[in-house]
Image (tube, helix red, strand yellow):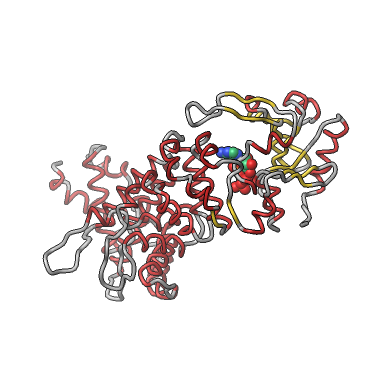
Amino acid sequence: MKRIRAPKELFDFAGELARAGKKAYLVGGAVRDYLLGREACDFDVATDARPEEVARLYRRVIPTGIKHGTVTVLWKGLEIEVTTFRTESGYADGRHPDKVEYASTIEEDLSRRDFAMNAMAFDLATELLVDPHGGQADLSGRLVRAVGDPFERFREDGLRPLRAIRFASQLGFEIDAPTLAAIRPSIPRFRLVSPERVRDELQKTLLSELPSRGLRLLEGTGLLEEIVPELSACRGVEQKGMHVFDVLDHLYASADASPPELVLRLAALLHDVGKPEAKAELPGEAPTFYRHEEYSARMSESILKRLKLPNAIVDEVAQLIRCHMFSYDDSWTDAAVRRFIARVGPERIEELFALRLADGAGILGRPIDPRSLDPLRARIDRVIAAKEAFGLADLAVKGGDLASIGVPPGRAMGAMLKELLEAVMDDPSLNERERLLEIAGRIKGKHGL
Ligand code: ATP
Ligand code: MG
């Protein structure tokens, strides 16, 4: 049997419970990850001590989930979630267990857990593994398998089907046939799950090494249609030119090819989601997807808001998608380069380039040469090094200066500042206070002043 290399501090922590005559087991993801030879991310400990008893034994305790029997103990640099043995019964609303009952044995506690590989416990006093559901065998067989009857387990909590797919994607495992077969019939239960819980699992799926693995499972089980029907609509939408895939496979391949950062993975997955809507076909001609980046940006905003992603992420993703259709050649003037930087935002250029590489890989079905972006990157670096203006903040006049020549604050002033910025992007030598005020004086009439 593989060793569990938990940190020494965790055993010290368990010693305190042992001295009080209580049990302490490491449970859940940490046991699974150690047995897989990985590092554990967080430490969950199950104990027969009640939360109040745990709180009395340790100095630094946060009552994170007292209602569910959980407290967090801060111990020698570790953050340990300590939960009293529980059973769970009845999920009338499909979201939360109706009542949480304490259990007296670790075996009872393990039997409420979702998958056999997540239902093992490591006794921190004896260093023996408790594995009543065959978790170790599943790890060697690389299988995600429900504890007990999968239909029943999915009926208790509709999030579990999505978790099965998340773990299969993260670990590169298969889903055991009966567990997989129970997913589609559980969809009515899945619909009751809160978007926040769905979001968390979806994020983890997207950050797996090959997110397409999870995405294909979502599609095959009918969950993709539930979560992001806009993506399902991309299936079978063929594209011409260099493209080797339909729109949905193109999006999967782009997600696989993008760096494992949430914003980039989301942008890669959704960057063409508007193509079915933007599609226009003339008889006898290849379809066009004119302005699909606009459709895709707007749709991704509504998708990500629905999934309760933070606004900052929604905005970043939409902005990357909106800008993804640039096509550089050396006929671009410096003004065009400045406009490009202004539109994308200087801090977002490298992310947009990463999206471009992922998009390219998704078109051809193989990686593209990252050096293809070097010429544009060099032009951008030069413009930025020359400190030429590409945002209102860089402009040599501010609103206050315009007010002093009689421009009232509000729309007219906004429009005027924008026009001055346009002028400066065409000719950076204009970016001096006196010159800009002179231009402002000349164009005032045009703005109805
Ligand atoms: P990760 O490493 O991604 O955190 P994890 O297995 O620790 O994976 P958590 O969501 O942190 O997953 O849950 C901790 C443990 O709690 C799981 O291993 C499992 O035993 C149990 N668990 C979590 N969610 C559920 C659920 N919806 N139904 C049943 N058991 C669950
Ligand atoms: Mg965990």
Q: Is residue 85 left or right of residue 188?
A: right
Residue 383: name its quadrant: bottom left
Q: How many labels does the image show?
A: 0
Residue furthest toward the right? 19
**Residue visible at 47% across and 45% down in the picture:** 183
Q: Is residue 288 above or below residue 183?
A: below
Q: In this view, does 245 lie above or below 391?
A: below
For ligand 1, which image quadrant applies?
A: top right
From the top left corner, tell me how far across and down residue 155 is, in percent: 50, 35
From the top left corner, tell me how far across and down residue 150 is, in percent: 54, 42
From the top left corner, tell me how far across and down residue 175 is, in percent: 54, 53
Q: In this view, does 250 lie to the left or right of 208?
A: left
**Residue visible at 39% across and 48% down in the picture:** 222
* Residue nearer the viewer, 433 or 416: 416
Residue furthest toward the left? 283
Residue 84: name its quadrant: top right
> Where is the C terminus found, in terms of image quarters?
top left
Q: In this view, does 438 lie above or below 428?
A: above
From the top left corner, tell me how far across and down residue 19 is, in percent: 88, 32
Whether residue 330 can be seen here = yes
Whether residue 396 can be seen here = no
> Where is the N terminus found, in terms of image quarters?
bottom right
* Residue nearer the viewer, 19 or 155: 155
Q: In this view, does 186 lie above or below 61?
A: below
* Residue nearer the viewer, 161 or 67: 161
Residue 356: name its quadrant: bottom left
Q: Is residue 180 left or right of residue 363?
A: right
